Amino acid sequence: MSKAPISFPESLEESRILIGGLHARIDILEEQNRLLRHQQFAASSEKTSPQEQGLLFDEAEEAAEDDTGAEDDDKEIKVPAHTRKRGGRRSLSKDLPRVRIEHDIPEEEKICACGCGLMARIGEEVTEQLDIIPAKMQVLQHVRFKYACKSCEEGVTIAPLPPQPIPKSIASAGLLAYVVTGKYVDGLPLYRMVPVLNRSGVEFNRTLLSRWVIKCGDLVQPLINLFTDHLLNYDIIAMDETGVQVLKEPGKKPQSKSYMWGQKGGPPDQPVILFHYDPSRAEDVARRLLEGYTGYLVSDGYQVYLNVTSDSTIIGVGCMAHARRKFNDVIKARKKSKRRKPGLADHAMEAIRALYRIEKLAKNMSDNERRLLRKEKAKPILKDLREWITKVKSSVPPTSLLGKALHYIDKQWPRLIRYLDDGRLPIDNNEMERVIKPFVIGRKNWLFSKSQNGAKASANLYSIVETAKANGIEPYSYLRHIFTQLPKAKTVEDFEALLPWNVNRNNVTPYIMQK
């Protein structure tokens, strides 16, 4: 194979242009290297310290800033004061059961020392401690009485066995709920759950637990269908997706990546969280999940979501956190120096911080009050930011981190300001990312799904436990309840009665939100 001939510059001017281009390329590569090193070794938090804000910006940013004249060396940064809660003994929940252990003094000490006789009890002092009873295995014996006629002896009548979550299985609703909670709430892989269960004296294996999990995923499918209808009937849905590895997929290598799509929607007092497994991240998956939907779609800047929201029935709402993240990458990747001069990325970050301060003020407002506050306070900030982006974008190399950040926010701008139209809309898609985080944490523990059936079961069961948590219900008690009642359900009304917002709260335990 012949090599392409090497061309040399024919004039001094061409040499200068070539060297300048090479220097610009080196600057961009060094910037990318600094960002990669920061991502590898530094803290992942997006919070920026005052010291970091004062570091020297990169050369491409400096050249653009010199043209705009945006300098402010004497800017003061104020850190708001805060109060700390004093530590102390925690008060124990009144919902916890109490076991009364009484302590009394000996009978001879109940006689008054002055000779007055027997002392009278005037009260008691209660000291509380937390105790725990480890998981205890027990056997449920379903005793069914038989009846027969002594005269004709033609037949025997026996009491029927109640419908079971898994017919002909030794697993009760409680045991199945325990296994599902361990994997999908606590992130405990099945192979680590096996020795825990075996300590009870009954032998388990991972294959058996896997089969139970897949059957539980099939059992809750009617509730997933109702969740889907409920989600699509509300006019705000947030979406995101993350990778998952499935070893046995037709036509794919075991090392290839599949995807878990997440959706969050429903009225604020009846939220629904759904997970969907699919081998693909293509546009047709998103369209299938949103089939028949009309309303807002909150998402990041992935092109698939842009294509889906090009339809008139679905209105795209962007994620300001993703725009902020890209400017934050510029700050992380710039060279360290003793100079204390803020750069262009700092200018954008300060504007975005101001928008989030407004959202903090509006947190407890009504939807209409929040919309009016945004119109009054946030709209002018966004107007100034839009003008600033238009002014500086052309002077920044598009392949630099700053150039990419400016290109992203410029392209996403109509979607990023959409939240001004409706007080119910969020400024970003962070809530969806928080919702999908339990799956990401669990994936780090169990690593992969063996089959497509396992991945689908995981999607269904994650949907159940996360929706239960979002509605203030403790996942184990909800799973135990629905695993008991689903086999008995026959009509649509029976299934609807098992939805988290319809379930009898006496049958489930309140969920304590983790801070």
Image: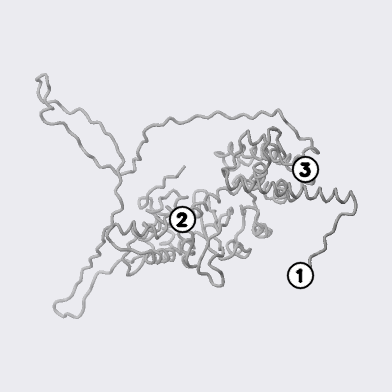
What residue is at 87 percent from the left and 51 percent from the top? 14
**How far, Cα to Cα, is label 2 from label 3?**
45 Å
What residue is at 64 percent from the left and 30 percent from the top? 77
Which is more foreground, mark 2 or mark 3?
A: 2
What residue is at 64 percent from the left and 38 percent from the top? 353
**How far, Cα to Cα, is label 1 from label 2?**
48 Å
Which is more foreground, mark 1 or mark 3?
A: 1
Asked whether, in this view, residue 14 is left or right of residue 374, the answer is right
Residue type, mark 3 in image: Val
Q: From the top left corner, tell me how far across and down residue 322 is, in percent.
A: 63, 48
Disc 2 secondary structure class? helix
Residue 1: numbered disc: 1
Asked whether, in this view, residue 309 is left or right of residue 483, the answer is right
* Most foreground residue, 69 or 14: 14
Q: Quadrant of residue 87?
A: top left
Say if residue 42 shows up in the picture.
Answer: yes
**How far, Cα to Cα, is label 1 from label 3?**
45 Å
Residue 392: numbered disc: 3
Residue most extreme to the right:
11
Disc 1 secondary structure class? loop
Disc 3 secondary structure class? helix
The residue carrying mark 2 is 445
* Most foreground residue, 113 or 504: 113
Q: Quadrant of residue 157?
A: bottom left
Residue type, mark 1 in image: Met
The disc, 1 or 3, on the residue closer to the chain's N-terminal end is 1
Q: Do the residues labelled 1 and 3 touch (CB within 8 Å)?
A: no
